[in-house]
Image (cartoon, helix red, strand yellow):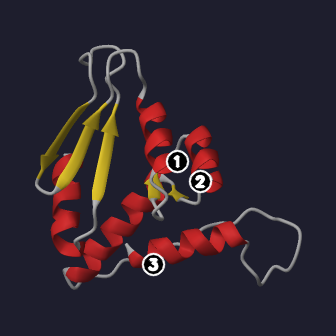
Protein backbone atom coordinates (compact mmCIF):
# COMPACT_ATOMS: atom_id res chain seq x y z
CA UNK A 1 0.00 0.00 0.00
CA UNK A 2 2.84 2.38 0.81
CA UNK A 3 4.45 1.96 -2.60
CA UNK A 4 1.09 2.34 -4.37
CA UNK A 5 0.39 5.57 -2.45
CA UNK A 6 3.83 6.91 -3.30
CA UNK A 7 3.37 6.01 -6.99
CA UNK A 8 0.13 8.03 -7.04
CA UNK A 9 1.88 10.93 -5.30
CA UNK A 10 4.75 10.71 -7.80
CA UNK A 11 2.30 10.80 -10.71
CA UNK A 12 0.59 13.92 -9.34
CA UNK A 13 3.66 15.86 -8.20
CA UNK A 14 6.50 14.44 -10.30
CA UNK A 15 8.86 14.38 -7.33
CA UNK A 16 11.79 11.96 -7.13
CA UNK A 17 11.12 9.46 -4.37
CA UNK A 18 13.47 6.91 -2.88
CA UNK A 19 12.25 4.35 -0.34
CA UNK A 20 14.75 2.39 1.74
CA UNK A 21 13.77 -0.91 3.34
CA UNK A 22 15.72 -3.01 5.84
CA UNK A 23 17.39 -6.09 4.44
CA UNK A 24 19.81 -6.61 7.31
CA UNK A 25 18.22 -9.89 8.47
CA UNK A 26 17.13 -11.43 5.18
CA UNK A 27 18.71 -9.29 2.48
CA UNK A 28 21.11 -10.33 -0.21
CA UNK A 29 24.85 -10.03 -0.22
CA UNK A 30 24.58 -6.72 -2.07
CA UNK A 31 22.25 -3.77 -1.81
CA UNK A 32 19.25 -4.25 -4.11
CA UNK A 33 17.96 -1.32 -6.21
CA UNK A 34 14.80 -1.32 -8.31
CA UNK A 35 12.34 1.18 -9.77
CA UNK A 36 8.59 0.61 -9.61
CA UNK A 37 6.22 3.20 -11.04
CA UNK A 38 8.93 5.87 -10.92
CA UNK A 39 9.75 5.15 -7.25
CA UNK A 40 13.33 4.08 -6.52
CA UNK A 41 13.31 1.24 -4.00
CA UNK A 42 16.41 0.18 -2.10
CA UNK A 43 16.77 -2.89 0.10
CA UNK A 44 19.81 -2.75 2.35
CA UNK A 45 22.16 -5.71 2.17
CA UNK A 46 22.40 -8.50 4.69
CA UNK A 47 23.81 -7.13 7.94
CA UNK A 48 23.15 -3.47 7.05
CA UNK A 49 20.18 -1.52 8.38
CA UNK A 50 18.15 0.90 6.29
CA UNK A 51 19.23 3.71 8.65
CA UNK A 52 22.83 3.27 7.48
CA UNK A 53 21.78 3.45 3.84
CA UNK A 54 19.72 6.60 4.46
CA UNK A 55 22.63 8.28 6.28
CA UNK A 56 25.00 7.36 3.46
CA UNK A 57 22.65 8.69 0.76
CA UNK A 58 21.96 12.07 2.36
CA UNK A 59 25.62 12.53 3.36
CA UNK A 60 27.10 11.72 -0.03
CA UNK A 61 24.51 13.47 -2.20
CA UNK A 62 23.83 16.89 -0.71
CA UNK A 63 21.00 17.98 -2.94
CA UNK A 64 18.38 19.24 -0.52
CA UNK A 65 16.81 15.96 0.48
CA UNK A 66 13.49 15.81 2.28
CA UNK A 67 13.72 12.81 4.59
CA UNK A 68 10.46 11.29 5.80
CA UNK A 69 11.20 9.50 9.06
CA UNK A 70 10.20 9.30 12.68
CA UNK A 71 13.60 7.98 13.77
CA UNK A 72 15.36 10.54 16.00
CA UNK A 73 18.87 9.56 14.90
CA UNK A 74 17.98 9.98 11.23
CA UNK A 75 16.27 13.31 12.00
CA UNK A 76 19.43 14.58 13.71
CA UNK A 77 21.66 13.34 10.90
CA UNK A 78 19.38 14.88 8.28
CA UNK A 79 19.58 18.34 9.90
CA UNK A 80 23.39 18.14 10.13
CA UNK A 81 23.60 17.04 6.48
CA UNK A 82 21.51 19.90 5.17
CA UNK A 83 18.39 17.81 4.58
CA UNK A 84 14.97 18.61 6.04
CA UNK A 85 13.38 15.77 8.02
CA UNK A 86 9.59 15.46 8.05
CA UNK A 87 7.82 13.10 10.43
CA UNK A 88 6.00 10.20 8.83
CA UNK A 89 2.73 11.39 10.33
CA UNK A 90 3.14 14.95 9.00
CA UNK A 91 3.92 13.55 5.54
CA UNK A 92 0.85 11.31 5.52
CA UNK A 93 -1.33 14.17 6.79
CA UNK A 94 -0.04 16.45 4.01
CA UNK A 95 -0.67 13.83 1.33
CA UNK A 96 -4.15 13.03 2.63
CA UNK A 97 -5.03 16.73 2.90
CA UNK A 98 -3.93 17.34 -0.70
CA UNK A 99 -5.93 14.33 -1.85
CA UNK A 100 -9.05 15.57 -0.06
CA UNK A 101 -8.60 19.07 -1.52
CA UNK A 102 -8.10 17.72 -5.05
CA UNK A 103 -11.36 15.77 -4.75
CA UNK A 104 -13.19 18.99 -3.84
CA UNK A 105 -13.72 18.00 -0.22
CA UNK A 106 -12.37 19.91 2.74
CA UNK A 107 -11.68 18.79 6.26
CA UNK A 108 -11.48 20.96 9.32
CA UNK A 109 -7.88 21.94 9.84
CA UNK A 110 -6.66 20.85 13.21
CA UNK A 111 -3.93 23.12 14.50
CA UNK A 112 -0.70 21.48 15.52
CA UNK A 113 -0.10 22.07 19.24
CA UNK A 114 3.38 23.57 19.27
CA UNK A 115 5.50 22.98 22.33
CA UNK A 116 6.23 26.01 24.49
CA UNK A 117 9.67 27.45 23.91
CA UNK A 118 11.74 30.48 24.66
CA UNK A 119 11.90 33.47 22.35
CA UNK A 120 9.29 35.31 20.36
CA UNK A 121 6.02 33.37 20.23
CA UNK A 122 5.28 34.93 16.84
CA UNK A 123 8.38 33.73 15.06
CA UNK A 124 8.99 30.10 14.07
CA UNK A 125 12.39 28.54 14.64
CA UNK A 126 14.57 27.89 11.57
CA UNK A 127 13.76 24.19 11.73
CA UNK A 128 10.02 24.81 12.05
CA UNK A 129 10.17 27.26 9.14
CA UNK A 130 12.00 24.71 6.95
CA UNK A 131 9.48 21.98 7.83
CA UNK A 132 6.51 24.28 7.20
CA UNK A 133 7.95 25.30 3.82
CA UNK A 134 8.45 21.66 2.74
CA UNK A 135 5.00 20.58 3.96
CA UNK A 136 3.38 23.40 1.97
CA UNK A 137 5.04 22.06 -1.19
CA UNK A 138 3.92 18.45 -0.71
The vertical placement of 23 against 129, above or below, is above
- Which residue bears the numbered disc 3? 136
Q: Nearer the viewer, residue 32 or 21?
A: 32
> Residue sitting at 28 percent across and 28 percent down?
31
Spatial CA span between label 2 and label 3: 22 Å
Closer to the N terminus: mark 3 or mark 1?
Answer: 1
Q: In the drawing, does residue 13 fall left or right of residue 136? A: left
Depth check, mark 3 against mark 1: the one in front is 1
> Residue sitting at 15 percent across and 57 percent down?
38
Residue contact at pointers 2 and 3, CB within 8 angstroms: no
Question: Which residue of the protein is positioned furthest toward the right in this rendering?
Answer: 118
Closer to the N terminus: mark 1 or mark 2?
Answer: 1
Q: Nearer the viewer, residue 115 or 25?
A: 25
Q: Nearer the viewer, residue 105 or 32?
A: 32
Residue contact at pointers 1 and 2, CB within 8 angstroms: yes
- Quarter of the image where one finds residue 113: bottom right
Tag shown at residue 59: 1
Spatial CA span between label 1 and label 2: 6 Å
Tag shown at residue 99: none
How many other residues sit within 10 Å of disc 1, few (<14), some (14-19) or many (≥20)? some
Q: In the drawing, does residue 80 fall left or right of residue 41? A: right
Tag shown at residue 81: 2
SS for callout 1:
helix
The vertical placement of 29 against 98, above or below, is above
Rendering coords of residue 4 (x, y %): 15, 52
Rendering coords of residue 105 (x, y %): 25, 82
Closer to the N terminus: mark 2 or mark 3?
Answer: 2
SS for callout 2:
loop
Residue contact at pointers 3 and 1, CB within 8 angstroms: no
How many marks are shown on the rendered structure?
A: 3
- Quarter of the image where one finds residue 130: bottom right
Depth check, mark 2 against mark 3: the one in front is 2
Amino acid sequence: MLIESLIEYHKKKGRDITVVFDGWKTGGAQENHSVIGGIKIIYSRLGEKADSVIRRIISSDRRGWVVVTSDRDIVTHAWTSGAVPISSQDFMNAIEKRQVESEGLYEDDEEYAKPRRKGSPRKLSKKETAIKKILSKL
